Image: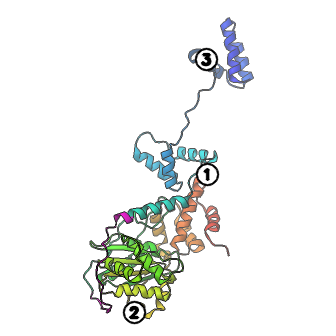
C-alpha cells in the first residue's frame, strides 16, 4: 500500500474518532515501515497537510559551472577550485563528482575537447594579432650585398625561466591542471636561443617527435628583452617559395592586401623585419631547399635584424641540404629524451595527479610506455584524468595504467 493511500485511510479513521494504536501498527505492517514512521506521516499530514515524501534538495550545476567544466576538459577539481574562489556555499568535491556523473549518465554532453582547444587557440591567435603593433612597409629598396653583421649586445633570453601555469604560454596546450616545467633541456634551449639573439644569428632545435621542442622554444621566448618581437611562421602544406613568402607576410600581420608582385612583397617583409625580431619556423624539416634559401635571403638582407630559430624533428637534416644556411647556424641544440633520473621530479611538477603515484610506479611507467617522451606523459595524464572522472572507485594502480598504455601507444 502506498503512503498517500495509507495516510488517507488513517486520517479518515482519525476524523471519525475511532483511530487506535492497533490501526497504526497494522498500517505499518502493511506499508513495511516502522510504527514510529507511520506516526510521523500522520503528524506531517495534520500539521503540514502533506501526505507525500518531502522533496529532497537536488544539487544542480549552473550553465556557467558547466562552461567552466568544459573549458577544464571535464576536470571536476578545477570546477571545485573555481567555485571556492567565487565564494559562497560550495559543495564537497565528492558531491560534485556525483552530480557530474549523474548528469552525464542522464545525457548531458560536454563539448568535445578538440573543439574547446581549437576555440582557445583561435582566441589566443586573435589576441596575439591585436597585441602586435607592427611597423608598416618601408619605402625604397636595399642593396643585395650580403653583409656579415656584427653581434649586438642583447641580453640572453630567459636566463632564468619564469614559473608558468597552464595556458600562460600561448601555443602550448596542456591537460587541465598541468603546468610547464623548466627541465634541463628547456634551460639548454633557452640558453641557445638567448645567445642567438645576442648575435642576431640562427639556431636549430631538433630531436625526435614528442620531446617538447616547440614547448621549450615557446618557454624560452615567453619573455624577451624590451624592443624585441617574436613571430611564429607556419610552414604551408607542400611549401613553395611563393607560399613561404605569403606565410611570412601573414605572420607579420602587415596591413593591406598581399602584394601582387614578389618584389613588393619582399620589400614589405624586409621593412617590417628592420626591427629586432625572432623569426621562429616550426616544422622546418618540411621545407625544401628553395624555401630555405628564401629564409636565408631574409636573414642576409642588410636592412633586417632577425634571429632565425628553425625547429622540428629532422630539421637538422633539412638544413644539411643547404650548406650556405647550415654554416650560418650558431647553435645546434638537440632536445633529448627525458632522463630517467629526472622523470619523477619533472612529472610530479608537471601535474599534481602524479604526486599520488608511488615513485617505483613512476619509474616503471617511463620504460614501459612513455620512454622519456613528454608528449606521451601528457597523453597519459589526460587519459588518467578521464578514467578517474568516469569510473567509479577508480584507483591509480598498475592494472589501470596498463589499460591506459594500450590507448596511448601506437599499435604494432
Left or right: residue 410 compared with residue 358: right
Residue beneath label 1, please? 393
Spot occupied by residue 94 in the image (x, y as percentages of width and height):
54, 46
Q: Nearer the viewer, residue 362 or 212?
A: 212
Mark 1 or mark 3, earlier in chain: 3
Question: Mark number for residue 227?
Answer: none
Image quadrant in which the N terminus is located: top right
Spot occupied by residue 356 in the image (x, y as percentages of width and height):
51, 59
Mark 2 or mark 3, earlier in chain: 3
Q: Nearer the viewer, residue 305 or 362?
A: 305
Residue 19 visible in the shown view? no
- 91 relative to 51, above or below: below
Q: Nearer the viewer, mark 2 or mark 1?
A: 2
Label 3: state its secondary structure: helix
**Secondary structure mainly formed by the magenta segment:** loop
Q: Nearer the viewer, residue 111 or 360?
A: 111
* Mark 3 surroundings: few (<14), some (14-19) or many (≥20) residues within 10 A: some
| Location of residue 199 by image quarter | bottom left
Label 2: state its secondary structure: loop
| Location of residue 99 by image quarter | top right
Callouts 2 and 3 close, C-beta under 8 Å: no
Residue beneath label 3, please? 45
Q: How is the image coloured?
A: rainbow
Residue beneath label 2, please? 327
Image quadrant in which the C terminus is located: bottom right
Q: Marks 2 and 1, Cα distance to the nearest angstrom?
A: 59 Å
Residue at 27% from the left image edge and 71% from the top image edge? 226
Q: Marks 1 and 3, Cα distance to the nearest angstrom?
A: 41 Å
Residue at 52% from the left image edge and 43% from the top image edge? 61
| Location of residue 205 by image quarter | bottom left
- Which segment is the magenta one? 128-150
Amino acid at each position: 500500500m502506498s503512503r498517500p493511500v495509507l495516510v488517507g485511510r488513517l486520517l479518515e479513521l482519525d476524523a471519525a474518532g475511532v483511530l487506535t494504536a492497533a490501526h497504526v501498527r497494522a498500517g505499518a505492517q502493511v506499508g513495511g515501515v516502522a510504527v514510529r514512521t507511520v506516526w510521523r506521516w500522520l503528524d506531517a499530514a495534520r500539521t503540514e497537510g502533506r501526505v507525500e515524501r518531502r522533496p529532497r534538495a537536488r544539487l544542480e550545476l549552473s550553465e556557467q559551472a558547466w562552461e567552466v567544466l568544459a573549458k577544464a576538459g571535464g576536470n571536476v577539481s578545477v570546477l571545485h577550485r573555481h567555485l571556492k574562489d567565487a565564494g559562497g556555499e560550495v559543495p564537497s568535491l565528492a558531491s560534485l563528482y556525483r552530480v557530474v556523473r549523474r548528469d552525464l549518465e542522464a545525457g548531458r554532453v560536454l563539448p568535445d575537447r578538440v573543439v574547446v582547444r581549437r576555440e582557445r587557440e583561435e582566441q589566443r591567435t586573435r589576441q596575439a594579432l591585436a597585441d602586435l603593433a607592427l611597423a608598416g612597409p618601408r619605402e625604397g629598396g636595399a642593396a643585395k650585398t650580403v653583409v656579415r653583421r656584427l653581434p649586438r649586445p642583447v641580453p640572453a633570453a630567459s636566463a632564468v625561466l619564469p614559473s608558468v601555469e597552464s595556458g600562460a604560454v600561448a601555443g602550448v596546450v596542456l591537460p587541465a591542471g598541468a603546468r610547464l616545467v623548466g627541465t634541463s633541456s628547456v634551460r639548454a634551449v633557452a640558453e641557445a636561443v638567448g645567445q642567438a639573439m645576442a648575435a642576431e644569428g640562427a639556431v636549430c632545435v631538433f630531436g625526435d617527435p614528442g620531446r617538447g621542442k616547440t614547448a621549450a622554444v615557446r618557454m624560452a621566448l615567453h619573455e624577451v628583452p624590451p624592443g624585441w618581437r617574436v613571430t611564429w611562421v607556419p610552414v604551408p602544406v607542400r611549401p613553395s617559395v611563393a607560399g613561404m613568402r605569403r606565410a611570412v607576410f601573414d605572420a607579420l600581420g602587415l596591413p593591406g592586401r598581399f602584394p601582387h608582385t614578389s618584389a613588393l612583397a619582399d620589400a614589405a617583409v624586409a621593412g617590417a623585419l628592420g626591427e629586432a625580431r625572432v623569426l621562429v619556423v616550426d616544422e622546418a624539416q618540411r621545407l625544401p631547399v628553395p624555401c630555405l634559401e628564401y629564409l636565408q635571403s631574409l636573414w642576409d638582407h642588410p636592412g633586417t635584424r632577425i634571429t632565425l630559430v628553425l625547429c622540428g624533428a629532422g630539421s637538422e637534416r633539412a638544413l644539411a641540404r643547404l650548406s650556405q644556411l647550415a654554416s650560418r647556424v650558431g647553435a645546434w641544440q638537440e632536445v633529448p629524451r627525458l632522463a630517467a633520473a629526472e622523470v619523477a621530479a619533472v612529472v610530479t611538477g608537471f601535474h599534481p595527479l602524479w604526486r599520488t603515484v608511488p615513485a617505483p610506479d613512476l619509474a616503471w611507467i617511463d620504460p614501459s610506455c612513455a620512454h622519456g617522451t613528454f608528449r606521451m606523459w601528457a597523453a597519459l595524464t589526460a587519459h588518467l584524468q578521464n578514467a578517474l572522472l568516469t569510473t567509479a572507485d577508480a584507483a591509480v594502480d598498475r592494472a589501470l595504467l596498463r589499460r591506459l598504455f594500450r590507448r596511448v601507444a601506437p599499435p604494432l
